[in-house]
Amino acid sequence: TAVASVGKSVAVAATSEATPPELVNAINNLDSAASKKDINAVMQFYTPNFTHSDGLTKQKLRDSLEGLWKRYNNIKYSTEVTKWDRKGNTYTVETVTRIQGAKPGNDGEYKLDAQLVSAQVYQANGDNLQMSRQDILAEKSSITSGEKPPKVELRLPDKIGVGRQYALDAVISEPLGTNLLLGSIIEEEVSPANYLKDTTIELEPLRAGGVFKIGQAPYTVGDRWVSVVLVQETGITISSQRMRVSKNTVGNQYKSSPESATTPSRVRPDPNSSQTL
C-alpha cells in the first residue's frame, strides 16, 4: 500500500517571489512538529472542518499519521513551495514534498523515499495559519530493503481516461546475472481505508528485465495506487505511483500504439505531451 499521501508538506524553498513570512513560519513549524511525531502540535495546523481529496477528515488524517509514525522510527519531511497566491486571508499553495523514513524489519532495515505534489489552502486564524483543504496532484514512493535492492524505473501514466488501457513498465536498470527475480503488481483504490492496509501478495518468477503489463483503468473516476513489488536474493523494492482516472483525460495526452498479433491495443504517454511520468 502506498503511504506517501499521509505525509504533510513541511519545509519551504524560495520561489520567484518571496514567500510570505507567515506562510514560511507555518510550514517550518509544521515541519518540526511532524519530524518529531508530535501529533497534537501537527493537528493545530488544520481547521476543524479540514477536507482532503482522498476523503480524509481531520480525525482520519490524525489516525493515518499516527499509523505511519508507528511503522517508521525515523521520518523526515522536506518541501519546496512551487506556487503560492494570496487573496485576503486565504493562501493557496502548491508544494513538492519529500518524505524519508526508516523502520526495522525481519530482514533488515526498510527505507521509505516518497515524493508528493499537492495543493493546500490555508486560512488565517488570528496570528496563525491553518490548512482547510489539501489536494494530492501526484505521488511516487519506494520502499527498499537489503544490501542491494533491485533498482527499478517505473513507467506509468499519471492520468488515464476511464476504461482506457495503459502500459505499465517496471524496468530493472542492472543485469540480474544468475539471480532469481520474483515480483507482483498491486492496484488499489486510493481511500482512507487503504492508507495503511496490509496487503497479501503472491510473488511470481519474472523474466530478466522487469515487469511489463497492459492494464485497464476502471470505469469509475478516482485515484489508484499502482505498485510493483520486486524481490531478489540481495534485497526488496516496492515502487508505487498514483494514477488518476478521469473522464476528462482524452485527446492527445495518450494514444494507442500499433496493434499486433501478440500485443493488444494499449495507451502510452504521448512524447509530445508535457505529462509527467
Image (cartoon, rainbow, N blue to C red):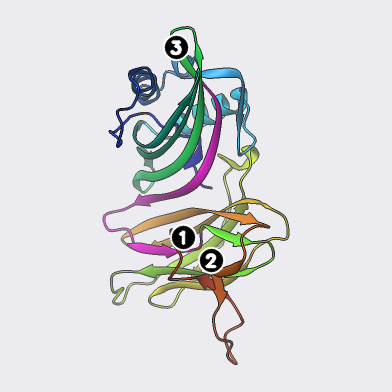
Q: Which residue is mark 3?
A: 128
Q: Is residue 147 left or right of residue 180?
A: left
Question: Residue 191 appears at what percent x and percent y?
Answer: 63, 42
Q: Nearer the viewer, residue 83 or 209?
A: 83
Packing grade of label 2 (10 A; few <14, some 14-19, many >=20) is: some
Image coordinates of residue 105 in percent, x first then y, are: 39, 42
- Asked whether residue 69 is in view, the answer is yes
The image quadrant where one finds the C terminus is: bottom left
Q: Is residue 232 visible?
A: no
Quarter of the image for residue 216 reads bottom right
The mark that comes first in sequence, 1 or 3, is: 3
- Give yes or no for contact between labels 1 and 3 (Cβ–Cβ under 8 Å): no
Q: Residue at x 33, y 72 (%)?
A: 179
Residue beneath disc 2:
253
- For the view shown, which residue lies furthest in the right direction? 219
Amino acid at the residue labelled 3? Asn
SS of the residue under disc 2: helix
Q: Quadrant of residue 93?
A: top left
Q: Earlier in the sequence, mark 2 or mark 3?
A: 3
For this orientation, the residue located farthest to the bottom is: 261
Mark pair 2, 3: CA separation: 41 Å
Q: Position of residue 149 (x, y in %)?
A: 32, 58
What amino acid type is highlighted by mark number 2?
Answer: Gln
Q: Which residues are magenta?
A: 131-157
Q: CA distance from mark 1 to mark 3?
A: 36 Å
Identified by mark 1, the residue type is Gln
Q: Are marks 1 and 2 in contact (CB under 8 Å)?
A: yes
* Separation (CA) of disc 1 from disc 2: 7 Å
Q: Which residue is mark 1?
A: 275
In the rendered image, the vertical position of residue 202 relative to residue 37, given as above or below: below
